[in-house]
């Protein structure tokens, strides 16, 4: 059984060419999967993790002078860089969400100044009762709380396709119910 340190040393040896230089192609091939696994743990989305690792690898290729000279240090440096980029992305996402919530709050305050058709709101609430609970949850998160379909999928831990289907079915039911009420 090898220790983590031994496997890192073994991996770092694969990154060095016979002339002693670090091979960028080998970095992507040998370190890429490890970095994607690390990034996926932080970002909880493999596609986002792959994009982030591409950015990290691009930085390595575009700035070879910034690389550590020792292959063993290169591996740990790239792991730290990937982790740091993940944390940066999560922080930026949190700031964006907070900003979006603030903007949404300002829009809601603005809409409160406009007259509201109380009868239409009552019809809408009555129509929402015909929805199944999972459809109502999706409608609530998308239309009343302003989440994207991808955010809803993550929040409810269901596939994106399921969110889209539930949203479409809910809108079809609401359309039929409101047409029935209006008639």
Image: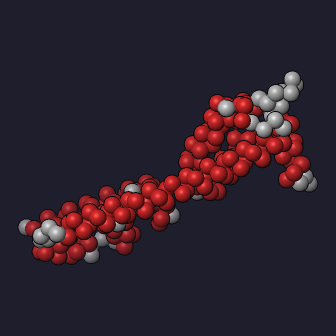
Residue at 84% from the left image edge and 42% from the top image edge: 72
Residue 112, quarter of the rendered image: bottom left
Is residue 154 or residue 131 the one in the foreground?
A: 154
Seen in the image, is 93 located left or right of residue 179? right
Is residue 96 or residue 13 the one in the foreground?
A: 96
Seen in the image, is 147 located left or right of residue 9? left
Residue 131, quarter of the rendered image: bottom left
Residue 11 on image: x %, y % = 83, 41
Q: In which quarter of the image is the C terminus?
A: bottom left
Residue 166 visible, this orientation: no
Examine the rendered structure and indicate whether residue 14 appears above or below residue 109: above
Examine the rendered structure and indicate whether residue 126 appears above or below residue 5: below
Residue 60 on image: x %, y % = 68, 35
Q: Residue furthest left?
A: 183
Residue at 64% from the left image edge and 36% from the top image edge: 59
Residue 18 visible, this orientation: yes
Residue at 17% from the left image edge and 76% from the top image edge: 122
Q: Which residue lies furthest to the front in this view?
A: 65
Examine the rendered structure and indicate whether residue 126 appears above or below residue 165: below
Residue 63, quarter of the rendered image: top right
Seen in the image, is 99 located left or right of residue 87? left
Residue at 86% from the left image edge and 23% from the top image edge: 19
């Amino acid at each position: 059984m090898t220790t983590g340190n031994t496997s890192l040393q073994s991996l770092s040896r694969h990154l060095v060419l016979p002339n002693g230089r670090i091979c960028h192609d080998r970095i992507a091939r040998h370190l890429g999967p490890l970095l994607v696994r690390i990034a996926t743990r932080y970002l909880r989305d493999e596609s986002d993790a792959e994009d982030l690792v591409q950015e990290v690898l691009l930085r390595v290729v575009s700035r070879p002078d910034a690389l550590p000279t020792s292959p063993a240090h290169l591996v740990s440096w790239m792991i730290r860089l990937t982790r740091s980029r993940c944390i940066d992305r999560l922080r930026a996402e949190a700031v964006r969400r907070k900003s979006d919530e603030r903007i949404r709050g300002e829009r809601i305050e603005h809409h409160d100044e406009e007259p509201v058709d109380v009868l239409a709101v009552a019809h809408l609430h009555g129509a929402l009762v015909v929805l199944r609970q999972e459809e109502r949850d999706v409608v609530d998160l998308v239309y009343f709380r302003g989440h994207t379909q991808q955010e809803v999928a993550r929040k409810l831990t269901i596939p994106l396709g399921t969110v889209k289907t539930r949203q479409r079915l809910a809108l079809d039911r609401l359309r039929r119910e409101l047409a029935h009420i209006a008639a």
